[in-house]
Protein backbone atom coordinates (compact mmCIF):
# COMPACT_ATOMS: atom_id res chain seq x y z
CA UNK A 1 0.00 0.00 0.00
CA UNK A 2 1.34 3.48 -0.90
CA UNK A 3 2.46 5.53 2.09
CA UNK A 4 0.05 8.29 3.06
CA UNK A 5 1.47 11.65 4.10
CA UNK A 6 1.00 13.13 7.57
CA UNK A 7 -0.71 16.36 8.50
CA UNK A 8 1.10 18.85 10.76
CA UNK A 9 -0.85 21.85 11.99
CA UNK A 10 1.32 24.73 13.11
CA UNK A 11 -0.43 27.44 15.02
CA UNK A 12 -0.03 30.00 17.76
CA UNK A 13 -0.52 33.70 18.34
CA UNK A 14 0.10 36.11 15.47
CA UNK A 15 3.58 37.52 15.93
CA UNK A 16 4.96 34.39 17.61
CA UNK A 17 6.95 33.85 14.43
CA UNK A 18 5.19 30.80 13.01
CA UNK A 19 5.23 31.95 9.39
CA UNK A 20 8.95 32.77 9.66
CA UNK A 21 9.60 29.30 11.10
CA UNK A 22 7.53 27.62 8.38
CA UNK A 23 9.16 29.64 5.59
CA UNK A 24 12.66 28.72 6.79
CA UNK A 25 11.66 25.08 7.33
CA UNK A 26 10.36 24.73 3.77
CA UNK A 27 13.51 26.27 2.32
CA UNK A 28 15.77 24.00 4.35
CA UNK A 29 13.68 20.86 4.13
CA UNK A 30 11.92 20.61 0.76
CA UNK A 31 10.56 17.17 1.69
CA UNK A 32 7.83 19.00 3.63
CA UNK A 33 4.95 20.77 1.82
CA UNK A 34 2.79 23.75 2.75
CA UNK A 35 -0.90 24.12 2.02
CA UNK A 36 -1.76 27.46 0.40
CA UNK A 37 -4.88 28.88 2.07
CA UNK A 38 -7.72 31.01 0.75
CA UNK A 39 -8.24 34.42 2.32
CA UNK A 40 -10.55 37.38 1.90
CA UNK A 41 -7.89 39.84 3.05
CA UNK A 42 -6.13 42.08 0.55
CA UNK A 43 -2.63 41.05 -0.56
CA UNK A 44 0.25 42.80 1.22
CA UNK A 45 3.11 44.21 -0.77
CA UNK A 46 5.09 41.41 -2.39
CA UNK A 47 2.44 38.75 -1.84
CA UNK A 48 1.57 36.68 -4.90
CA UNK A 49 -1.83 35.14 -5.59
CA UNK A 50 -1.58 31.35 -5.54
CA UNK A 51 1.81 31.41 -3.79
CA UNK A 52 1.24 33.09 -0.43
CA UNK A 53 -2.55 32.79 -0.48
CA UNK A 54 -5.41 32.35 -2.90
CA UNK A 55 -6.87 35.85 -2.54
CA UNK A 56 -10.64 35.59 -3.01
CA UNK A 57 -13.64 37.87 -2.68
CA UNK A 58 -16.18 37.58 0.17
CA UNK A 59 -18.65 36.19 -2.40
CA UNK A 60 -16.23 33.50 -3.58
CA UNK A 61 -15.44 32.55 0.03
CA UNK A 62 -19.19 32.17 0.72
CA UNK A 63 -19.48 29.99 -2.36
CA UNK A 64 -16.60 27.76 -1.19
CA UNK A 65 -18.32 27.36 2.20
CA UNK A 66 -21.57 26.37 0.45
CA UNK A 67 -19.68 23.88 -1.71
CA UNK A 68 -18.19 22.36 1.49
CA UNK A 69 -14.76 22.94 -0.04
CA UNK A 70 -13.01 23.82 3.22
CA UNK A 71 -11.16 21.41 5.46
CA UNK A 72 -11.38 24.18 8.08
CA UNK A 73 -11.96 27.89 7.98
CA UNK A 74 -12.12 30.76 10.48
CA UNK A 75 -12.61 34.48 10.95
CA UNK A 76 -9.24 35.95 11.89
CA UNK A 77 -8.81 39.65 12.62
CA UNK A 78 -11.76 40.84 10.52
CA UNK A 79 -10.96 38.56 7.55
CA UNK A 80 -11.70 34.94 6.66
CA UNK A 81 -9.12 32.24 6.01
CA UNK A 82 -9.61 28.63 4.96
CA UNK A 83 -7.76 25.45 4.02
CA UNK A 84 -9.06 23.65 0.95
CA UNK A 85 -10.06 19.98 1.36
CA UNK A 86 -8.76 19.16 -2.12
CA UNK A 87 -5.26 20.37 -1.29
CA UNK A 88 -5.08 18.31 1.91
CA UNK A 89 -6.52 15.21 0.25
CA UNK A 90 -4.21 15.38 -2.75
CA UNK A 91 -0.99 16.01 -0.82
CA UNK A 92 -1.65 13.27 1.74
CA UNK A 93 -2.69 10.80 -0.94
CA UNK A 94 0.53 11.52 -2.81
CA UNK A 95 2.44 10.62 0.35
CA UNK A 96 3.58 14.16 1.11
CA UNK A 97 3.87 15.41 4.69
CA UNK A 98 1.83 18.59 4.72
CA UNK A 99 1.95 21.64 6.97
CA UNK A 100 -1.06 23.84 7.65
CA UNK A 101 0.03 27.17 9.07
CA UNK A 102 -3.26 28.40 10.45
CA UNK A 103 -4.84 30.26 13.37
CA UNK A 104 -5.75 28.56 16.64
CA UNK A 105 -9.51 28.29 15.88
CA UNK A 106 -8.81 26.47 12.62
CA UNK A 107 -6.29 24.27 14.39
CA UNK A 108 -8.87 23.29 17.03
CA UNK A 109 -11.24 22.23 14.22
CA UNK A 110 -8.56 20.05 12.63
CA UNK A 111 -7.39 18.48 15.90
CA UNK A 112 -10.98 17.64 16.89
CA UNK A 113 -11.84 16.04 13.57
CA UNK A 114 -8.58 14.35 12.66
CA UNK A 115 -7.00 12.33 15.46
CA UNK A 116 -3.96 11.66 13.25
CA UNK A 117 -3.17 15.35 12.73
CA UNK A 118 -0.20 16.58 14.76
CA UNK A 119 -0.72 19.94 16.49
CA UNK A 120 2.35 22.11 17.02
CA UNK A 121 1.86 25.30 19.02
CA UNK A 122 4.42 28.08 18.49
CA UNK A 123 4.61 30.26 21.57
CA UNK A 124 6.36 33.57 22.13
CA UNK A 125 8.69 33.54 25.15
CA UNK A 126 6.82 36.46 26.75
CA UNK A 127 4.12 39.07 26.15
CA UNK A 128 6.75 41.79 25.85
CA UNK A 129 8.53 39.89 23.11
CA UNK A 130 5.30 39.31 21.19
CA UNK A 131 4.45 43.00 21.25
CA UNK A 132 7.91 43.94 19.99
CA UNK A 133 7.67 41.40 17.13
CA UNK A 134 4.29 42.70 16.03
CA UNK A 135 5.59 46.27 15.93
CA UNK A 136 8.76 45.33 14.06
CA UNK A 137 6.75 43.56 11.36
CA UNK A 138 5.67 47.01 10.24
CA UNK A 139 2.62 45.65 8.44
CA UNK A 140 0.17 46.27 11.28
CA UNK A 141 -1.56 49.45 12.37
CA UNK A 142 -1.62 50.36 16.09
CA UNK A 143 -5.29 49.35 16.12
CA UNK A 144 -4.59 45.91 14.65
CA UNK A 145 -1.66 45.34 17.06
CA UNK A 146 -4.04 46.09 19.93
CA UNK A 147 -6.70 43.70 18.55
CA UNK A 148 -4.10 40.95 18.08
CA UNK A 149 -2.64 41.31 21.59
CA UNK A 150 -6.13 41.13 23.10
CA UNK A 151 -6.66 37.77 21.41
CA UNK A 152 -3.41 36.23 22.62
CA UNK A 153 -4.47 35.15 26.13
CA UNK A 154 -7.29 33.06 24.66
CA UNK A 155 -4.97 31.63 22.03
CA UNK A 156 -2.38 30.53 24.60
CA UNK A 157 -5.16 28.83 26.60
CA UNK A 158 -5.72 26.48 23.62
CA UNK A 159 -2.07 25.31 23.66
CA UNK A 160 -2.96 22.51 26.10
CA UNK A 161 -4.81 20.65 23.35
CA UNK A 162 -1.77 20.45 21.05
CA UNK A 163 0.75 17.62 20.81
CA UNK A 164 3.88 19.79 20.89
CA UNK A 165 4.86 23.28 22.03
CA UNK A 166 7.75 25.19 20.47
CA UNK A 167 9.01 28.21 22.41
CA UNK A 168 10.31 30.64 19.84
CA UNK A 169 12.98 32.47 21.82
CA UNK A 170 13.89 36.12 21.46
CA UNK A 171 16.72 36.34 18.89
CA UNK A 172 18.32 39.23 20.79
CA UNK A 173 18.78 36.81 23.69
CA UNK A 174 19.25 33.58 21.71
CA UNK A 175 20.81 34.59 18.34
CA UNK A 176 19.94 31.33 16.57
CA UNK A 177 16.39 31.20 17.97
CA UNK A 178 14.89 30.77 14.49
CA UNK A 179 17.17 27.87 13.53
CA UNK A 180 16.48 26.16 16.86
CA UNK A 181 12.70 26.48 16.38
CA UNK A 182 12.93 25.23 12.78
CA UNK A 183 14.96 22.18 13.78
CA UNK A 184 12.59 21.45 16.66
CA UNK A 185 9.66 21.38 14.24
CA UNK A 186 11.59 19.24 11.77
CA UNK A 187 12.62 16.86 14.58
CA UNK A 188 8.94 16.34 15.36
CA UNK A 189 8.22 15.55 11.71
CA UNK A 190 11.14 13.10 11.53
CA UNK A 191 10.17 11.40 14.77
CA UNK A 192 6.57 10.99 13.56
CA UNK A 193 7.86 9.37 10.37
CA UNK A 194 9.66 6.77 12.50
CA UNK A 195 6.58 5.88 14.57
CA UNK A 196 5.72 2.19 14.56
CA UNK A 197 2.44 2.80 12.72
CA UNK A 198 4.39 4.36 9.85
CA UNK A 199 6.91 1.53 9.79
CA UNK A 200 4.47 -1.38 9.94
CA UNK A 201 4.41 -1.91 6.16
CA UNK A 202 8.19 -1.88 6.10
CA UNK A 203 8.43 -4.37 8.99
CA UNK A 204 5.82 -6.65 7.40
CA UNK A 205 7.77 -6.68 4.16
CA UNK A 206 11.11 -7.23 5.88
CA UNK A 207 9.66 -10.06 7.95
CA UNK A 208 8.23 -11.69 4.80
CA UNK A 209 11.61 -11.38 3.04
CA UNK A 210 13.41 -12.91 6.00
CA UNK A 211 11.02 -15.82 6.11
CA UNK A 212 11.20 -16.38 2.34
CA UNK A 213 13.39 -19.49 2.36
P1 LIG B 1 -1.90 36.90 7.90
O1 LIG B 1 -3.03 37.75 7.47
O2 LIG B 1 -0.94 37.63 8.82
O3 LIG B 1 -1.19 36.25 6.74
O4 LIG B 1 -2.51 35.70 8.75
C1 LIG B 1 -3.31 35.96 9.84
C2 LIG B 1 -3.59 34.67 10.56
O5 LIG B 1 -4.39 33.81 9.74
C3 LIG B 1 -2.35 33.87 10.93
O6 LIG B 1 -2.50 33.45 12.29
C4 LIG B 1 -2.40 32.69 9.99
O7 LIG B 1 -1.80 31.54 10.56
C5 LIG B 1 -3.90 32.50 9.86
N1 LIG B 1 -4.25 31.70 8.68
C6 LIG B 1 -3.66 31.65 7.47
N2 LIG B 1 -4.25 30.76 6.66
C7 LIG B 1 -5.25 30.19 7.38
C8 LIG B 1 -6.24 29.18 7.11
O8 LIG B 1 -6.31 28.59 6.03
N3 LIG B 1 -7.10 28.88 8.10
C9 LIG B 1 -7.06 29.48 9.33
N4 LIG B 1 -7.93 29.10 10.25
N5 LIG B 1 -6.15 30.43 9.62
C10 LIG B 1 -5.26 30.79 8.67
Image (tube, rainbow, N blue to C red):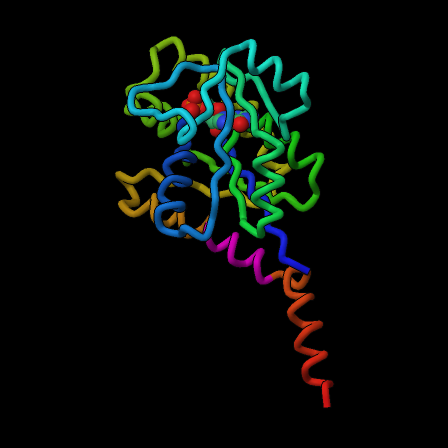
User: Horizontally, is 137 left or right of 5 in the view?
Assistant: left
Q: Nearer the viewer, residue 42 or 159?
A: 42
Residue 95's place in the image compared with 194, above or below, is: above
Left/right of residue 101 with respect to residue 199 in the rendered view: left
In this picture, is 76 found above or below 159?
above
> Measured from the top left, where is residue 109 in percent x and y?
66, 30
Q: Is residue 190 above or below residue 13?
A: below
User: Overall secondary structure of the magenta stretch?
Assistant: helix
Q: Residue reaching furthest bottom? A: 213
Q: Can residue 126 be seen in this view?
A: no
Quadrant housing residue 69: top right
Q: Give the range drawn in magenta.
A: 186-194
Residue at 40 percent of width and 14 percent of height: 42
Residue at coordinates 45% horizontally, 15% vertically from top-left? 41
Q: Which image quarter is the N terminus in? A: bottom right
Q: Can residue 122 be seen in this view?
A: yes
Give yes or no for residue 189 being in the magenta stretch: yes
- Tell me which residue sits at (51%, 34%) in the image: 11
Q: Where is residue 146 in the image (x, y as percent from the top left)?
A: 41, 13
For the C terminus, the quadrant is bottom right
Residue 42 covered by magenta stretch = no
Numbered disc total: 0
Image spot of residue 164 (x, y percent): 56, 45
**Residue 15, image x and y in percent?**
40, 27
Q: Residue at x 34, y 19 (%)?
A: 44
Amino acid sequence: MAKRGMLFVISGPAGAGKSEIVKTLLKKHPDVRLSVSCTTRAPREGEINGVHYHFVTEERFDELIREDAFYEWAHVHQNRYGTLKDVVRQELNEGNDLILEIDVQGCQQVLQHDPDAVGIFVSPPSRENLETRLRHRGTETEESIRVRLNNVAGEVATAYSYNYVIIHQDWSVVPDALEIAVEEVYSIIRAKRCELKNRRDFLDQLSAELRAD
